[in-house]
Structure formats: C-alpha cells, structure tokens
Amino acid sequence: MILPPDQGWILAYLGLADSAEAKSGLGQVQSLVAARPLAAGQILREEDLTSKAPLQGLTDSLKSWVIGKKVLYDLHPDDPITFGVIEL
C-alpha cells in the first residue's frame, strides 16, 4: 500500500507501522467483509468472514478479535465489517 506522506498515521493506527508490508509499500491491506448474508443478532464465525481489498472496514488482522461478536444490522455479502456493525 502506498500512502501519501501525511497519511502514515493510518498505518500506525492499524498496527502496520512496523510490518514489512507497510515498510515496503508493496502489500495491500485487506478488510474484513461478510462472506454471505448475515442477520442482525447473529454471532460471527470464521466462515462468515472473508478478506478483500481495498481496506474499507476493519483490517483482516483483527479477524480473531471479530469472531464471536454479534452483528448489529443485516449485512449483505461483501459488506465491510466495521466497529459500527458489530457489538463491542
């Protein structure tokens, strides 16, 4: 991922500032998205999630943290998983 110099804080926020991918600028950060339709109230399982680029929601490095969280709204396949759609 190549970011303008003033956007480096985003990598630090996502926990990527020290990764080889972030330093090289060659990798592309992927986000967690719904792998299939998800109903409000459903508890997320690994098979409910997939990773896709570009980053639109939570980074896929948070997948283990997201598993077991409750979905707050109905989601369609490929809808990004964000802090706003899961119960914290």
Image: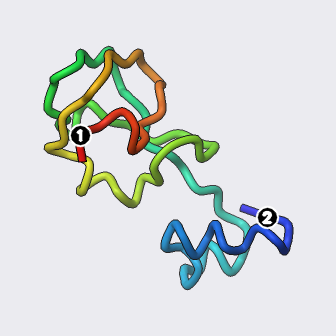
- Which numbered tag is attached to residue 3? 2
**Observer-nearest residue: 51 or 10?**
10
Q: Quadrant of residue 43?
A: top left
Question: Which residue occupies the foreground of this view, 12 or 1?
Answer: 12
Residue at point 59% right, 79% down? Answer: 17
Give the image location of residue 15, x and y in percent.
49, 73
Image quadrant containing the N terminus: bottom right
Structural distance between the alpha carbons of marks 1 and 2:
30 Å
The three-letter code of the residue at mark 1 reads Glu
Quick check: 37 above or below 47?
above
The amino acid marked with disc number 2 is Leu
Of helix, strand and loop, which one carries label 1? Answer: loop
Left or right of 82: which side holds 88? Answer: left
Answer above or below: position of 14 versus 34.
below
Mark 1, residue position: 87
Foreground of the two, 71 or 1: 71
Specify which label sits upstream in the sequence, 1 or 2.
Answer: 2
For this view, does 74 lie left or right of residue 41? right
Q: Label 1: how many residues lie within 10 Å, few (<14), some (14-19) or many (20+)?
A: some
The percent coordinates of residue 40 (x first, y second) are 23, 19
